[in-house]
Image (spheres, helix red, strand yellow):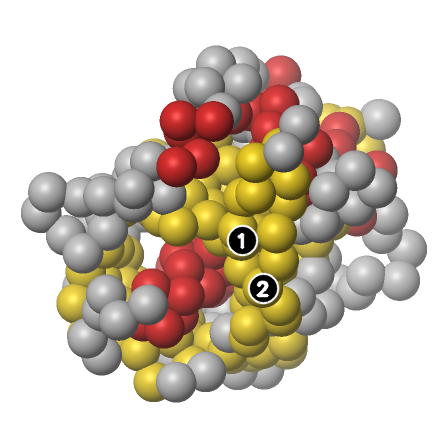
Amino acid sequence: MKPIFFTKMEGTGNNFLIIDNRNGYLTVNVTEQTIPEFVKTLADSQLGAGSDGVILLEQSAEFPFEMRYFNRDGSEAVACLNGARCVIGFAYRLGLLKDKGKIASASGPIGYYYRGDIVSVEVSPPVDVKLNFSFTVARKKYNANFLRVGVPHCIIFVDDFKKLDVKKVGEAVRNHKTFKPEGTNVDFVKVDKDSIHVRTYERGVEDETLSCGSGALASAYIATKLFMVQSPVKCVTKGGEMNVTIKDKLYLEGPIKFVYDGVYYLD
């Protein structure tokens, strides 16, 4: 059996298994073709450690490291902002980072500011922004907005969450023909004075998560564009609070936590 060492971390309830793969140890024992299956097993709460996603910390020629992100279902995504905040804390513990700088990701460089258990990430403004369109799900009309913050997000504003089945509606919207072929993350947002409450159905996890960093960022951006709130925006999720600041770039700040270090044994 071959040991694979990992660290479990969480950022406002969004949890990740992080593997230091700078020496290529994992990818020597797990081929590129079988990484998705490995991730699905490791992220499964019955067969592995259980998580929303798996992050590989890998070598980068230009930056201290590159983060490679995999969803719970084994699919690879170009970005995960709560994951980025956590892997920055992990890399800082390894002595790879200073308090401020940039890391590499498939979506491009991600700037960061490290302050102990609080980490802020800096990303470029979203693209493919589409405001105020509608579609029908199960004979109900939904007014929505769309944008990409590395990954796609559909933003739907709601009056409350009492009668909303986030998983059921989120799954239907995620797979709606409007967002074919890749699908979308779905954020349900309630505006409350100077803050927003966000619940997210995550593509790749295929369920509601306790929080989603890019979802909070996307929701705050749209809420400011529609003049519902002003920056900075407090984003309240089921897993905790984050703050979004919108300037020439976008900034997401929130807490991170080390949960435990572990070992997974490959057959």
> Quick check: 18 above or below 72?
below
Q: Secondary structure at mark 1?
A: strand
Q: Amino acid at mark 1?
A: Phe
Residue 261 image label: 2
Given contact means CB atoms under 8 Å apart, are the residues at marks 1 and 2 in contact? Answer: yes
Residue in the foreground of this view, choosing between 196 and 149 = 149
Residue 126 image label: none
How far is disc 1 from disc 2 in space, using C-alphas? 6 Å
Residue at screen point 23% across, 65% down: 96
Residue at screen point 51% across, 36% down: 70
Residue tagged 1 = 6
Residue 18 place in picture, x, y as percent: 49, 52
> Quick check: 151 above or below 15?
above
- The answer to which quarter of the image holds residue 158 is bottom right
Residue at screen point 41% across, 66% down: 90
Q: Secondary structure at mark 2?
A: strand
Q: Amino acid at mark 2?
A: Asp
Quarter of the picture containing the N terminus is top right
- The answer to which quarter of the image holds residue 257 is bottom right
